[in-house]
Image (cartoon, rainbow, N blue to C red):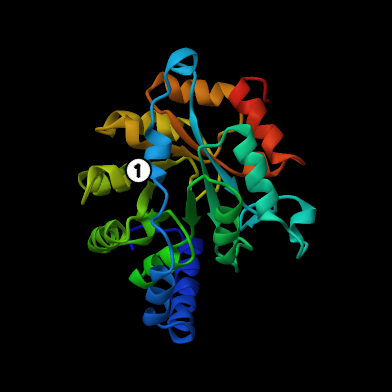
Amino acid sequence: MSHDVPSFLRRIVDVKQEEVRKAKAARPMDALKELISELGPPRNFFGALTRIATGANARTDTAVIAEIKRKSPSAGWIRPEYANEDFDPVAIARQYQGAGARAISCLTDEQFFAGKLEYIHAIRDAVPLPVLRKDFIIDPYQVWESRAFGADAILLIAECLRESEIVDLMILAHELQLTVLLEVHSMDNLLRVRPHIGFPKASYTLLGINNRDLNAMTTDLNNTLRLVDLVDEPRVLVSESGITTPDDLRRLRAVGVRIALVGEHLMRHDAPGDALLAMLNGTGH
């Protein structure tokens, strides 16, 4: 884990370590490998997001990773009805696909975000978009688990991992044909991971800049705008959190950032797909 990690993130990692221990006991690695042997290859998450638009949309196109998120430690339940057991991630994924999302992000952490690992297969069976497993991945077991449960990509949070752990997890993800979204929140962590973007193969790694301040738990799009000049290849850069309007997407495009992960803003809407469509069409607020 990197230095100066907020206490709440340390608590999540502590819980995750215990979850991984229990998961290993309940479903040994051989069982995961057997599940993987029955699956086809992952979908190309990296390619779906870095494909450059042509024609009329070339200058106005942002590739959006639309997120399915029921709750968060900072916001609680995003909408009251998301607390119900009949929460339907597949219906939301279908809305996102219809609205023009390039990929889906799915929270799978149960204790803090009310996600489920099983959501990934259900979503993937319903829509043709690649799916990112959004969780706190700290152990190689979780990479195998992600692949076994149908994920096409995994999130690695730099603040949760030592540099050697990041490299090892990226190598394993590449071996399993998974795209890595390597996320940072600060300049220090960006400088720490920057040499590893594109490792071990260029077409398997995206760099995420999260606009959430982990201490104040506030979001500021300027975090991406401040750090973008330190990124060698803006084509692989994803801006995350605090993106709510078409103007936010325009500001990102103006500095060369053409991929955005949008979650809470969409999930607060009674029809998340309509909110995404409005954002992409330039009519959202």
- Tell which of 109 and 50 is nearer to you: 50
Task: Using residue 143 as the reference point, say whether residue 105 is left or right of it.
Answer: right
- Tell which of 201 and 170 is nearer to you: 201
Q: Which amino acid does label 1 sit on?
A: Leu
Q: Residue at x 32, y 61 (%)?
A: 176
- Assess disc 1: are there few (<14), some (14-19) or many (≥20) residues with their C-alpha within 10 Å of its C-alpha: many
The answer to which quarter of the image holds residue 278 is top right
**In which quadrant will I find the C terminus?**
top right
Q: Which residue is drawn at 73% across and 58% down?
A: 87
Q: Residue furthest bottom?
A: 25
**In which quadrant will I find the N terminus?**
bottom left
Residue 144 horizontal/vertical position (percent): 38, 68
Q: Name the residue under label 1.
A: 206
Q: Residue furthest top?
A: 56
Residue 42 horizontal/vertical position (percent): 40, 54
Total marks in image: 1
Residue 203 vertical placement versus 55 (above, below): below
Task: Using residue 200 as the reference point, say whether residue 159 is left or right of it.
Answer: right
The answer to which quarter of the image holds residue 49 is top left
Q: Residue at x 60, y 39 (%)?
A: 97
Residue 216 vertical placement versus 57 (above, below): below
Residue 105 shows in the view: yes
Residue 230 horizontal/vertical position (percent): 27, 33
Residue 214 shows in the view: no
Residue 56 horizontal/vertical position (percent): 49, 13
Q: Callout 1: helix, strand or loop? A: strand
